[in-house]
Image (spheres, rainbow, N blue to C red):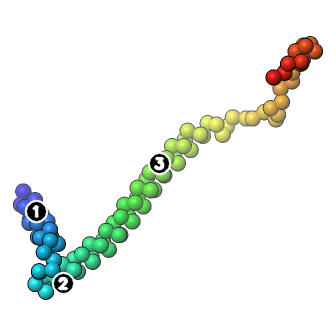
Amino acid sequence: MKTLAVLAVLVLAVVLCDRFKETLPTPIKQIYTLWETFSHYLGIVMSFLMLTVLWIVGFGMYGIILKIISLPKRFTTEPDSFWIDATPSTKESMHHQF
C-alpha cells in the first residue's frame, strides 16, 4: 500500500510539472527537462526491445508450428509423372469435349 501511495505522488508530481512547465522554478524545470529527455530515450530502447521480443516469439512460434505441421508432407513420395492414361470409348465422346 505504501508503494502505491509513493507511486501516486510521483505521478501527480509529473502531471503537475507537465501542466505548469513554464511557471516552474529554474532548477525544477531543468530536472524535469532532463527527466523528459531520459524518458524519451528509455522509451525508444524499451519499445525496440519489446517489439524485438514480440517479433521473435510471434513469428518464431509461427514458423516452428508450420514446420511441424508440414513435416509429414516431406516424406511422401511423388510419382515420376502425373500423366493419366485415358482410353477414348467412341468418336462421339470426343465430339463435345467441353
Disc marking residue 8: 1
Q: Residues within 10 Å of mark 2 (few under 14, many from 20)?
A: few
How far apart are labels 1 and 2 at the CA level?
A: 22 Å
Give the residue number, with chain letter if any, for mark 3. Answer: 61
Determine whether the residue tagged by mark 1 lies in a helix, strand or loop: helix
Determine whether the residue tagged by mark 2 lies in a helix, strand or loop: helix
Count of residue discs:
3
What's the residue at 44%, 51% (across, down)?
Answer: 58
Closer to the N terminus: mark 1 or mark 2? 1
Q: Residues within 10 Å of mark 3 (few under 14, many from 20)?
A: few
Return the residue nearer the eye: 1 or 39.
39
40 relative to 18 in the view: left or right: right
- Please identify, in this view, whether the residue under mark 1 or under mark 2 is nearer the observer: 2
Q: Quadrant of residue 34?
A: bottom left
Q: Relative to residue 43, is residue 26 depicted above or below?
A: below
Verify CB contact (< 8 Å) between mark 1 and mark 2.
Answer: no
- Please identify, in this view, whether the residue under mark 1 or under mark 3 is nearer the observer: 1
What amino acid does circle 3 point to?
Met
